[in-house]
Amino acid sequence: MMQNAEMGTNGIHRTGDLCIAARLLSKGLELKDIDRGNSRRSDFVFADRQHRPELVHSFMCGRATGNLADFICYVKGAKRLLCSVEV
């Protein structure tokens, strides 16, 4: 699923994609909340930044760079957040 390439509504960006959420966390975007309103899907809610569209696009196109071990840690951390009660 392709993410919106523009700034999110009201400075907020939402994604249900665990790996994109991990990418954004690894690049320092602020996680505001996890929306668990739908029992079949949770959305990570980030404070949006101007460089977020490029971070998502580079990840989706396979051009993201960084340390793989660090990224895996962020994926595991995002999974833990999904299972936690609070963000």
Image (tube, helix red, strand yellow):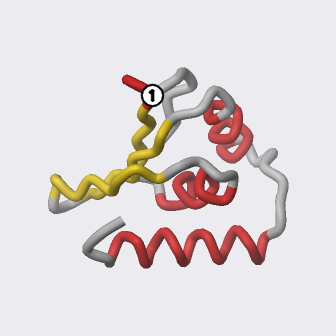
Residue 43 versus residue 60: which sits nearer the camera? 43
Above or below, 59 relative to 8: below
| 12 horizontally vs 66: left or right | left
Residue 15 placement (x, y as % from top left) = 43, 46
SS type, badge 1:
helix
Q: Quadrant of residue 75?
A: bottom right
Residue 25 versus residue 15: which sits nearer the camera? 25
Task: Provide the residue designation for mark 1.
Answer: 11
Residue 24 placement (x, y as % from top left) = 60, 51
Q: Quadrant of residue 86?
A: bottom left
Report the residue at 54% width, 77% height from top.
76
Report the residue at 33% width, 57% height from top.
34
Residue 4 placement (x, y as % from top left) = 50, 28
Q: If the image is split into quadrants, where does the C terminus sit?
A: bottom left
Going by the numbered disc 1, the residue's amino acid type is Gly
Report the residue at 54% width, 21% height from top.
6
| 22 horizontally vs 65: left or right | left
| 63 horizontally vs 60: left or right | right
Above or below, 56 relative to 22: above
Above or below, 81 relative to 54: below
